[in-house]
Image (cartoon, rainbow, N blue to C red):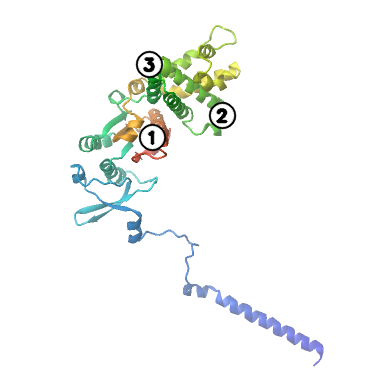
C-alpha cells in the first residue's frame, strides 16, 4: 500500500469521525431532549402571581371595621391605599400598601371600580386621617361620603361643583398670593413677600403650561415663557393694589385686555406706562422683563398669548366659583383633615380644563408646603382621580 492510499484512508477516517461527532452533539441538543430539561430562565417572562407569604410580607393587614372607626375606635395608624382584602367568617382584613405608589385601575362600566374600590378607600382614608381630593362625575360620591367624613371623622368638606356652580364652594386661584401679600403689607417680613411671589409663579405656570412644558413648544417657547412672566407680574399687581373683592383671575384677564388697548402715545404701550409707575426694584418689573424688552409686535403677541390662555375662564357660571372667597386653603388641607370633591359634568367638556388646572395647582402648592417641612408632609395626602380620562381629555 503506497503513501497516497494511506493518506486517503486517513482522510476518510477523519471525515467519518467528524460526522459521528456532529451527530452525537446534535442528538444531545435536539428537540427530543427538551422535555427532560428544566426551562424558564426568563425567556418566556418572569411574571407570576404572588404567593400568600409574599402578599403578607408586602402589604399591611388592617382589620376593616368601619362601624368601629365611626365611633372613634380602633382607628388605623397606617397611611396607604387598600389594594385588596381577605374575608374570613364575618370579618374582613384590608391589604394596605403603605409605599409611595401610584395605582391605576382599569375596568369597563359597571364592574365596580367606584363601589368596590373607591368607597372603601375613602372610608379608610378618613379613618386614617389623610386629606384627600377626588373627582366625582355624577355627584354620587359627594352625596354618599361627604356627610360621613364630616360627621364621624371631623373633616372639613369643600366641593367644587361644576354641574351646579351656584351651589359650589369658591375656588380663588389667587388665594395664597393674596394671603401672603396681605401678611407682607401688615408685617413687612420678606418671607411673606417671597411666598406671595412663589405662589404667583405657580399659578401663572399652571395656566400657561396647562398642556405641558413650554420648552417643548419649539420656536414659540419664547412667547409662552414671556407670557408666563407677564402673567406672574399682573397677578402680583392685582394682589397688591386691587381691593379684596377684585383680587381674582377674572380681574387678571380684564387688566391684560385693557393693557392691550392703544395707549395714545406712539411707541409706548399701556403696559409699559403701567410698569413705569412702579419702583425700580418692584418684582413685577422683573417678571415682565422679557415682554418689556422685546419689540412692540412681540410684546403684543406675548400679551395675546396670556390673554388666550385666560379666555377659558370667561364663563358666567365659572365666575361664581372663581370670583369669591375660596374654601380651599392648601396649607390647611395639608395640615388638617380635609376633603375636596370635584364634581364635573361628563357631558360638558368645556369645563373639564378647570379640573386639570386644579389638580396641577394643588400638586405644585402641596410640593411647596412639603419643601417647607423638610421634603415630607406630616400626613399623607391622597388624590383619587375617578374617571380621570374624561376629566382631562379636553
Image side of residue 199 versus residue 266, left or right: left
Residue 391 marker: 1
Q: Residue sitting at 81 percent across and 91 percent down?
A: 2
Q: 82 or 283: which is nearer to us?
A: 283
Q: 237 or 311: which is nearer to us?
A: 237
Mark in front: 1 vs 2: 2
Quarter of the C terminus within the rendering? top left
Give the Cα separation between the discs numbered 3 and 1.
Answer: 29 Å
Which is more N-terminal, label 1 or label 3?
A: 3
Q: Is residue 344 visible?
A: no
Label 3 Cα neighbours within 10 Å, binned few <14 / some 14-19 / many ≥20: some
Q: Residue furthest bottom?
A: 1
Mark in front: 3 vs 1: 3
Give the Cα separation between the discs numbered 1 and 2.
Answer: 26 Å
Label 1 Cα neighbours within 10 Å, binned few <14 / some 14-19 / many ≥20: many
Residue 297 marker: none
Q: Which residue is mark 2?
A: 221
Which is more N-terminal, label 2 or label 1?
A: 2
**Residue 360's spot in the image, x, y percent?**
42, 33
Whether 116 is drawn above or below 260: the answer is below
**Residue 332's spot in the image, x, y percent?**
32, 31
Q: Which residue is mark 3?
A: 246
Quarter of the N terminus within the rendering? bottom right
Is mark 3 in CB contact (under 8 Å) with mark 1?
no
Whether 85 is drawn above or below 394: the answer is below
Whether 51 is drawn above or below 85: the answer is below
Label 2 Cα neighbours within 10 Å, binned few <14 / some 14-19 / many ≥20: some
Which is more N-terminal, label 3 or label 2?
A: 2
Q: Is residue 46 visible?
A: yes
Is mark 1 in CB contact (under 8 Å) with mark 2?
no
Amino acid at each position: 500500500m503506497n503513501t497516497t492510499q494511506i493518506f486517503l484512508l486517513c482522510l476518510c477516517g477523519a471525515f467519518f469521525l467528524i460526522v459521528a461527532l456532529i451527530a452525537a452533539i446534535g442528538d444531545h441538543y435536539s428537540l427530543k431532549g427538551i422535555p427532560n430539561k428544566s426551562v424558564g430562565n426568563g425567556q418566556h417572562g418572569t411574571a407570576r402571581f404572588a404567593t400568600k407569604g409574599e402578599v403578607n410580607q408586602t402589604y399591611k393587614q388592617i382589620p376593616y371595621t368601619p362601624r368601629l372607626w365611626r365611633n372613634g375606635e380602633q382607628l388605623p395608624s397606617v397611611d396607604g391605599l387598600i389594594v385588596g382584602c381577605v374575608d374570613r367568617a364575618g370579618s374582613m382584613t384590608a391589604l394596605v400598601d403603605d409605599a409611595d405608589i401610584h395605582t391605576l385601575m382599569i375596568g369597563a362600566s359597571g364592574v365596580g371600580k367606584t363601589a368596590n374600590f373607591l368607597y372603601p378607600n375613602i372610608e379608610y382614608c378618613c379613618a386614617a386621617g389623610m386629606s384627600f381630593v377626588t373627582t366625582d362625575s355624577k355627584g354620587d360620591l359627594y352625596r354618599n361620603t361627604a356627610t360621613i367624613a364630616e360627621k364621624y371623622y371631623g373633616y372639613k368638606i369643600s366641593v367644587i361643583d361644576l354641574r351646579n356652580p351656584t351651589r359650589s364652594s369658591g375656588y380663588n386661584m389667587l388665594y395664597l398670593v393674596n394671603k401672603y401679600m396681605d401678611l407682607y403689607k401688615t408685617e413687612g417680613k420678606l418671607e411673606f413677600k417671597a411666598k406671595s411671589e412663589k405662589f404667583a409663579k405657580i399659578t401663572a405656570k399652571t395656566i400657561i403650561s396647562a398642556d405641558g412644558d413650554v420648552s417643548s413648544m419649539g420656536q414659540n417657547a419664547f412667547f409662552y415663557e414671556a407670557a408666563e412672566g407677564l402673567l406672574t407680574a399682573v397677578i402680583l399687581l392685582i394682589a397688591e393694589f386691587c381691593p379684596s373683592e377684585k383680587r381674582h383671575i377674572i380681574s387678571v384677564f380684564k387688566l391684560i385686555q385693557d393693557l392691550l388697548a392703544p395707549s395714545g402715545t406712539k411707541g409706548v404701550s399701556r403696559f409699559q406706562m403701567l410698569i413705569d409707575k412702579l419702583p425700580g426694584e418692584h418684582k413685577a418689573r422683573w417678571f415682565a422683563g422679557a415682554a418689556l424688552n422685546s419689540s412692540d409686535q412681540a410684546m403684543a403677541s406675548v400679551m395675546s398669548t396670556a390673554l388666550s390662555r385666560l379666555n377659558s375662564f370667561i364663563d358666567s357660571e365659572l365666575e361664581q366659583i372663581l370670583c369669591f372667597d375660596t374654601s380651599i386653603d392648601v396649607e390647611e388641607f395639608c395640615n388638617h383633615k380635609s376633603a375636596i370633591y370635584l364634581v364635573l359634568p361628563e357631558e360638558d367638556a368645556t369645563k373639564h380644563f378647570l379640573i386639570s388646572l386644579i389638580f396641577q395647582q394643588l400638586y405644585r402648592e402641596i410640593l411647596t408646603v412639603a419643601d417647607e417641612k423638610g421634603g415630607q408632609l406630616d400626613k399623607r395626602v391622597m388624590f383619587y382621580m375617578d374617571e380621570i380620562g374624561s376629566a382631562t381629555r379636553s
